[in-house]
Image (cartoon, coloured by chain):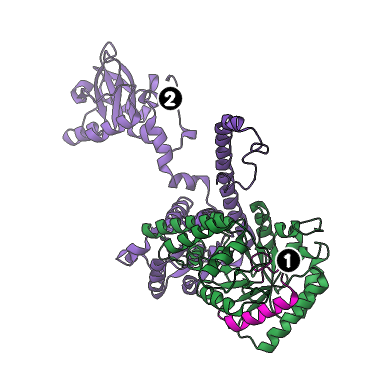
Chain colours: A green, B purple
Amino acid sequence: MGPFIAPRGLIVEPITPLTNDGSIDGQGLKKLLARLIPFSQGLFLSSPCMGEGKTLSAEQRVELFEEALVTIRGRVPLLFWITRDTEKDTRETLLALREILRKSSYPGEVLWVDSPLFYHSNRGLPAYYQNLCSLVSEPLVLHNDPELIRGLTKPFKRQNIRTAILKELASLPSMVGLIFLGSLDRAYNYQRACRTSAHFRIYDGDELQFLDHPSMGGVVSRGANLAPKTWQEITEASLQLRGDQKYDPEYLSTTWQRGQYLRDLVDLYGQTPVALIKQVLWDLGIIQTCFCTRPADHMEEAKERIKEMLDRYGDL
Amino acid sequence: MLNRNDHSGTFPPAGFLSLPRAEQAGRFHEIFCAGIGSMVIDEAKEVLKIEAQSILGLVDRIGAEFEKAIEIILKNKGRLILTGMGKSGLIGRKIAATLNSTGTPSLFLHPAEAIHGDLGMVTPNDIVLAISNSGNTGEINTLLPLLKKMGVKIIALTGNPDSPMTKMCDLVIDVAVEREACPMGMAPTASTTAALAMGDALAVVLLKRRRFNPDDFRRFHPGGSLGDRLAVKVREIMLTGKRIPTVPMGSKVQRAIEEIEAKGIGATLVSNKVGKLAGIITDGDLRRLLLKQKNIGELRVEDVMSPSPWTIDQNRTTAEALASMEMHSIMHLVIVDGEDRIMGIVHLHDLLGREEFRVNGAFHRTPGTHR
């Protein structure tokens, strides 16, 4: 069997539907994922920002994972954020989730996503991951988000994985990708470092960066919660997944307009993506409540504009 | 909205928003324009960096497949046929041109035209280099099975080594890029740059392996040197002074033959007593005369010469001189001044270069002429 090939294209970063008491809204999750699966090449659940993974308890994550396995049923690869506050907690979460996966005889692909600098410094990361990879048979994806690390009460000295360290990590057979947020200059350095690892993919975690200069690995999108079809069309166009339409002027014009529509959406939900997207999905009847761990105010106008745009572009 | 694409975060400048409104308004235009200007340059720099990275990425990936491609192209007895649609097609045309000028016979085949008859230009001895970044181009994927059926070897130049296209190819050269510079794949940018650079790499390696030398290069590039040559003035290349073959009126034809032989341009001018042009005797005139009578050496030149030969002003270009020669089916033009005094003569070979497509570096400037 050859090395695992990480999915390429649109990876959606779904919100985590919660009920008012903070438990997972299973019905909402089912509806949401059913809406997203046909248009995505992967789903990144429990992500630190959109999936509220940073504030979900270990029990909530387990519950979310179990619900996701039942709903997705192997139709698209599932990426799941395992990071906790400490190395020990992260390892325990990983093993707990791994055990659930083993018991479920899940037919599809699961990739564990970890933000190492959330609880570990760059020093000793290769040895740490060698050990972590030996505990599980599923592939791992790294998550590099300097904003996430900057927001910690006691951040490590560095907010990005060091390029030389990434090079070592990318050479591990189980390490198949990186969700990258940060400057383009760093992206070039990372790409250069990972070139020798043919199996390693770099995804744009920053939607605007992808819309401007698309990474050929694909994008991890928040806006796809709202407009999955358009995000898929734009990702297909950007990665040139279909070679037959690109000479059609009508197609180019539509692509340009849809790209602009996605940018406008990002501008609208950019400041409070979780709360606002949950509000819209709740209004659309997809999730049962708009409860989120970080509520925001004064979103009515933005919400109405988003709904109006979704309607206009056929994403309702 | 202004700074949506401004990754540096320096626009508007720090402190601007805390200025009094009147001052903000006063400085808005200055700052706004400076901001837009720097955004434009920043965007342009990003594009150039992405394109540069796309080529650097190839450096790490190039390997055995490239070597094999070089090997089979060198062994091949036919031509290297490039094919591709859209921007890839344009890249294919450029690579074909580079290959041709560096010693690898090559041509471009449009995939759509190919399946409407142009496929006839392909022989089983040829090799096809198919370019498609996605590897999903419909026209290419229609064409390749037909080529395969003809027994033609196919090399893919693609950014997607796992695509349907590559399954029909004998070799796959990976030109994948990590990032495109253009939003939403509207126009391939970094990927076409990478394909073009790889094409150049193929051409240059083939050139070196074939031991292609500067003389070969000149042989394939007559246009450049010839173009330069035809732009110069007649006065710069005409033969002048003692190099002009001339015999005076009243001389015997034998003298004219000796003059033609001595000056070596296949003709001699005939001048009157005051040095004005009276006529011309060419090799052709003598040949035709010999057919009529055997003993021509004792004849006088005025009996044999063509009076009023074609002339041209010394300030005309050599292109005009060439056109005049073509129009009148002659090999020589005489340069005279306003009073018909002989100033020089040009031969067709002086216009084209006496050696085969001689380059300007080796251009022999006639002594005694002035710009």
Residue A197 is one of the magenta-drawn residues = no
Q: Nearer the viewer, residue A273 or B160?
A: A273
Contact (CB < 8 A) between labels 2 and 1? no
Measuring from the top left, give residue B13's x and y in whole percent: 65, 38
Measuring from the top left, give residue A100's x and y in whole percent: 70, 84
Q: Which residues are magenta?
A: A46-75
Residue A50 is one of the magenta-drawn residues = yes
Q: Nearer the viewer, residue A57 or B323?
A: A57
Q: Is residue B345 visible?
A: yes
Please indicate whether residue A305 sits to the left or right of residue B222 in the image: right
Residue at 26%, 24% (x, y): give it: B311
Residue A86 lies, with reference to residue B249, above or below; the image says: below
Residue B182 lies, with reference to residue B71, above or below; the image says: above
Q: Is residue A210 visible?
A: no
Measuring from the top left, give residue A183's x and y in whole percent: 66, 53
Residue B343 lies, with reference to residue B151, above or below; the image says: above
Extreme residue in the left direction: B292
- Reading the image, the residue beneath label 2 is B366
What is the number of the mark on residue A115? 1
Residue at 65%, 62% (x, y): give it: A295
Amino acid carrying label 2: it is Thr
Q: Secondary structure at mark 2?
A: loop
Residue A59 lies, with reference to residue B342, above or below; the image says: below
